[in-house]
Image (cartoon, coloured by chain):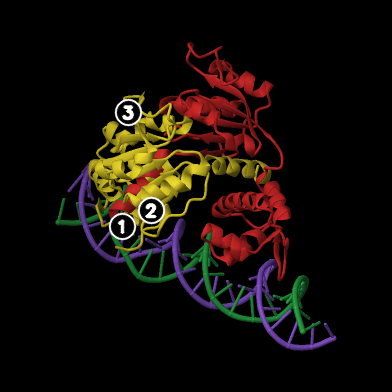
Chain colours: A red, B yellow, C purple, D green
Amino acid sequence: MKKVSESTVRRLSRYYRVLQVMEKEGEATISSRELAQREKLTPAQVRKDLSLFGSFGTRGLGYGVKELKERIAQILGLNRTWRVALIGVGNVGSALVSYKEFAKQGFLIKLLFDSDQRKIGKNHKGFLIKDVGDLVRDLKENQIELVIIAVPADQAQKVVDQVVKAGVKSILNFAPANIKVPDHVFLRTVNMAMEIEHLSFALVNLI
Amino acid sequence: MKKVSESTVRRLSRYYRVLQVMEKEGEATISSRELAQREKLTPAQVRKDLSLFGSFGTRGLGYGVKELKERIAQILGLNRTWRVALIGVGNVGSALVSYKEFAKQGFLIKLLFDSDQRKIGKNHKGFLIKDVGDLVRDLKENQIELVIIAVPADQAQKVVDQVVKAGVKSILNFAPANIKVPDHVFLRTVNMAMEIEHLSFALVNLI
DNA sequence: TTAGCCTTGTGAATTCTTTCACAATATAGG
DNA sequence: CCTATATTGTGAAAGAATTCACAAGGCTAA
């Protein structure tokens, strides 16, 4: 398979959302033109992206909504469930536990961790909060595949090191910190301050 | 000024964070090599990015940490404060109110809105929650420049329309919805499900 | 069946981004 | 002052992503 760029993966996610809506609306097919329109892209871009994974359109007609949706789900790994642990039950962590979209796409939160003795052992939205001290053991025992980090910035690296030690290969980090991981681990950091900085740049420079 | 790409702005945010750390560590200068190393980029990339905005390094020596930090702050619009309103005091909204990084970079939350009658009028972390029905009036009266949307997906477009009507030019959206805004409004959507989908793609395809 | 449309899939062209490579210039030490 | 070393700033080269443009194929309706 040709190299799939970051931007292509990002767009696949967007196509997937459009297709979910289209399916609900009862549409049987969608053309690259329409898909592009909905996401403010070019039809050629859509076709190029999809062509990386094979050719599943019909000339003259477009793509089967259901079929294309299934295919993208398969590409993105959404046609299965993932065992997720969330570390840090503060404001952000707490919001993420309730975030419906995760479960909808098959990301099932199985474990919650915190380091605060007052939280450990308590029930939070149906989950027992576990001690971050037992992280390595518990992640392994529960075959966690994916971890979400929502701890304060100054604890993030230490926690990530434990997560890596437990053999987890994929980490989504919400701590505003510069985390280092070995090459074989895939880390994505979401920094909300960076997003808002982009907006202020736009306000200052573009508008 | 030459066109500044999305990726460049994103990297400027990252440089800014490194420089904050460097300044605290008491470093007076930093070279493009060191800055690149810390962010896993190439020195040429760093220099190209900075050169878009002028030349403020010294050959043979590097960049003055304090000076460069100030300069990037100015470019990104962080050398001032912004008046921010947050709409939707649910799980995500609530987390964002407490998110320290915003205030640290000068994004000051001035108003909170919700549509839930049980929340309106109540105090939330020191803010009076206002009625989303009065959005247009209150945003104008309080000279809000930047709005953060954290309402459920199905209400997002309606709320954004009001925000645009109030003359706000910059919107940060956390609702998992496809929002449309006029060309003169700058919208950024953070979709946490998309971020985690990237991780599952990596797990399925790359690792 | 044929004419008229429409839409995919994809090489080629174009545009955008990153990296290279080096002249220009600063510092440090003798 | 001179030499060795470091580092910027930037055209040019290379590489990546996007868009163009069109042949190939399929649908509809008479």
The residue under label 3 is which amino acid type?
Leu
> Is residue B162 in sight in this rendering?
yes
Q: Are marks 2 and 1 in contact (CB under 8 Å)?
A: yes
Q: Which element is circle 1 on? A: loop
Query: Where residue B180 appears, x then y in whole percent?
Result: 46, 54
Q: Which residue is mark 2?
A: B186
The correct choice, above or below, for B130 with respect to A159 in the image is below
Dot 3: few (<14), some (14–19), or many (≥20) neighbours within 10 Å? some
The residue under label 2 is which amino acid type?
Phe
Nearer to me, B188 or B142: B142
Query: Where residue A183 appears, x then y in whole percent?
Result: 57, 39
Q: Residue at x 28, y 41 (%)?
A: B83
Q: Residue at x 56, y 27 (%)?
A: A86
Numbered label attached to residue B128: 3
**Chain ID for label 3?**
B
Q: Which residue is mark 1?
A: A207
Rounded to the nearest angstrom, the CA distance separating label 2 from label 1 is: 8 Å
Q: For this view, does A150 lie left or right of residue B127?
A: right
Q: Which element is circle 3 on? A: strand
Rounded to the nearest angstrom, the CA distance separating label 3 from label 1 is: 31 Å
